[in-house]
Amino acid sequence: MKGLRIQCMGWLLFFAGTATPFCLHAQEPSTREPSTQEALIQETLNHGEPDQGLPTREPLTIEQALDIAEENNPDLIASKLNLERYQQHLVAQRASLKSRFSLDLTPVNYSRSRRFDNRLSQWYTNETLNTSGTFMVSQPILLTDGEISLINTFGWQDNHSIVEGRENQNRAFSNDLYVRLNQPIFTYNRRKMEMKQIEFDYENAGIRYALQRLNTERSITNQFYSVYMAQNNLAISKEELENTSQSFEIIRNKVEADLAAREELYQAELNLANAQSAVEERTVALENAKDQLKQTLGMPLNEDIEVKGEIEVSPVAVDLNHAVQSGLTSRMELRQREIDIELAELQMIQTKSMNEFRGDISLSIGIIGDHEKFHNMYDNPTKNPRISVSLTVPIFDWGEKKARVKAQKIAQTLAQIEQENLQIDIELEVRQTWRRLENLRTQIDIAEKSVRNAELTYDINLTRYREGDLTGMEISQFQTQLSNRRMAYAQALINYKIELLNLKILSLYDFEKEEPLVPVRDLSRIIH
């Protein structure tokens, strides 16, 4: 019977993956030497710790992690560059409304051609050499979408013609100075609309940057506490390994003194192997969590980090109505929906302008002078007024404009529905987060009591185990229970802090500091 029990215990150890050699029959187990066993345990406990001879980075706090992400997070950098791009578009659009100066030069223009004069019904040969330049100052008019320009064209020409063997030649300077006004009528102001659209794009980019900062803060906080929790779990596993190692030594000494059955030693070896495996698994989990955090922070993956945080929770009084109202009045997503509605209205104006009846007025007045001598150009100036009115009259478009207007009305309705749904979603999210906060406060109290009870229970049963009243399987269960209670308590504290952060982001109000949250105060400072 005893051999059968030993055989069953051997199979249990085999399937558990323990490396302890033993027989599957009633043979003596081969146990490790004390020095070898202690060396293996010490190696497992020290696994993953930095070399003491190398310089190590100071442990990161959550505030330091957020500062690093502000400069290195890839998503935040991309959002900042996008904001700067729209700012430059806005700067360019505002600059386009100022006076523009231009100079067009034609240093040399030579031509020789054979032409037919319709007035005299005869052919003639014309040879021309001229040079000219045009200086123009144009000023867009934002109020009316028109443009007023001052234009001056100065030139010199040498014109030579041969008509029926008779030569004619003229060399003279000329200057044409006039003011021109171009004004569209019966249509919308395109310059104003372009300016509004670019301003909305810039504001939208600023909102997206602010939201990205909040999302980055949430992501980093989650990953920061994931690393913190992984460190905590590893520390608990190492403590469990040390306790299991002590239990193993106790039972080994008892077996060697024939005070306990040998199968207890098998169970102790299995417990020890499981404890070593747990340390290794949680070491791997810690390294993976560190890599995730380093990626979000924009740090090199080969750089070792360690986090330091306080997870002490002080109850925060949160008024639900205040949180909901703050979210409905401050959330930037609502402003985004308002921008979408206003952009849809601008798009409707553009859609209605398709195949529209419109006109253009062009008016100019000035003087032109010419003479063989430069200083005599305006001895006999000529006035050159010009005026033109052009109209575009649509006739039939097969219903294209009507269909596009209907489609745009549907888009406007969808934008309004999205805004209304967003308000409901914000209130719903704030309410749910507030309820989770209240529930987590209760869970923290329960988890704290559970840890105290598990510690007392483990201490009592460890004494019973040393006295031989408990088996190795039973003490292992109490050790696992204690570890799980400690991890559950730490996780409850972290969950509370994360939910408090979520509520701050959802309501844009910091209930710990009792002040509104402004994600971005000065966009120009962020960009530059």
Image: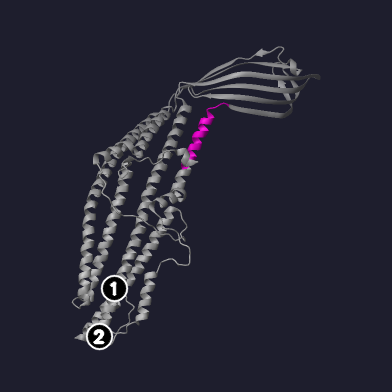
Q: Nearer the viewer, mark 2 or mark 1?
A: 2
Of the two numbered discs 2 and 1 on the same chain, state the one appearing first in sequence. Answer: 1
* Type of amino acid under label 2: Ala
Residue beneath the point at 38% across and 43% down: 211
Q: Position of residue 9 (x, y in %)?
A: 25, 80
Q: Which residue is mark 2?
A: 257
Q: Position of residue 356 (x, y in %)?
A: 44, 25
* Type of amino acid under label 1: Thr
Residue 91 is a magenta residue: yes
Figure quadrant of the N terminus: bottom left
Magenta-tinted stretch: 82-99
Image mark for residue 302: none
Q: Is residue 400 above or below residue 118?
A: below
Q: Is residue 268 above or below residue 208?
A: below
Q: Could you tell me which secondary element the residue under label 1 belongs to?
A: helix
Q: Main secondary structure of the magenta part?
A: helix
Residue beneath the point at 67% across and 16% down: 368
Residue 48 is a magenta residue: no
Q: Which residue is mark 1?
A: 244
Instruction: Depth check: give the residue in front, 86 or 482.
Output: 482
